[in-house]
Amino acid sequence: MGFSPSYVLNNIAIDLHRGIIMFSSHYTSHRLNTQIQTAAQFGQVFAPRDPQSHKGTHGTLAVIGGTAGMSGAVILAATAAIYNGCGKVWAGFNQPALPLPVIPERPEIMLSTAASLQLRNDITAWAIGCGMGLCKEALTLLYTQLTSANREVPVLLDADALTLLSRYANLAALARDYPTLVLTPHFAEAARLLGVSSAEIQANRTAAATQISSLFHAYTVLKGHHTLVCSPDGSLYTNLSGNAGLATAGSGDVLSGIIGSLLAQGIDTEQAVRGGVWLHGAAADVLKDSAIGEIGMLSGEIAPAARWLRNRIIEAHR
């Protein structure tokens, strides 16, 4: 139905001639048909929900990080997780007390100190490291997680958690023995994990991703242009979605939240990791197509666009 003339405000289209109010979307995708076809390889990620499901059905993600001055990293990851279908999300701050009583824009997210959060036994996936810091408290948090009695729960390690792995051999040994581990380094973090230069990583990113997965028996997400995902068995996936708008502060935190959310929802690990990487990039493509553009794209804009695209694809697959 056309609108002539019309206004579109906050996703509400108002037809001035007929006085009709209809909901519209400020998102668009010039490549939606291709995205629908590509998403078919991640069937679990884009499966419709059971009408009888409830919040417990869709898992509980715990995000740990956020030392003083870096609280935003945990908030970005937790927000991305709740936007992408996780039933419940905890944000755990590596601080002695909560930096804020509630996230005003996202009161759906539950808050805790990181140490208290690790005492819970109802978590279905963990994402650890976003702005966590490299202090002794961060070291304790990572050690506690890797020695947890509930070792069947998937753990994603990002950012400062990866740097700690590279600095402490005992932590690296514990990580290598963890059943379901996802590592999401950028090139500098990958260089630390392998004890080489950043230039060596960039010169052969495929070899670097493969070596990290082999060393830690983990799923490795080597972030960058055409992000690489390597499985513990050495199989590689090259992601082709995304654009230069992702080169912005917090984009990696959002990726951790998206992948962590999918893991918490019980999606197969390989599909959750590959599908999460693809969805993260595809959401940036949606933002580019929606007149936002690459320059000045904010990491906080990625998760709502990913939600829109995921639901559009699910409806198309029906």
Image: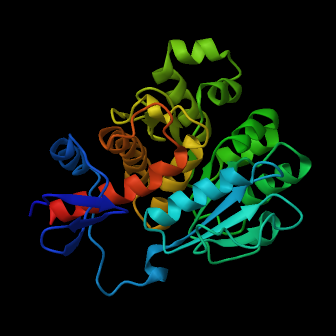
- Of all residues shown, which one is farthest toward the bottom? 52
Q: Residue at horizontal 49%, vertical 82%? A: 56
Tell me if residue 223 comes above or below residue 161 in the rendering: above
Viewed as shown, does residue 100 lie left or right of 312?
Answer: right
Residue 19 lies, with reference to residue 279, above or below; the image says below
Can residue 240 be seen here?
Answer: yes
Residue at figure coordinates x 21%, y 51% from the top left: 40
Q: Residue 24: horizontal and vertical position, in percent?
A: 25, 63
Q: How has the structure been colored for display?
A: rainbow
| Percent x, y of residue 87 | 49, 75
State the quadrant of the C terminus: bottom left
Image quarter of the N terminus: bottom left
* Residue 183 position by quadrant: top right
- Residue 161 in which image quadrant: top right
Is residue 217 visible in the rendered structure shown here?
no
Which residue is nearer to you in this view: 61 or 81?
81
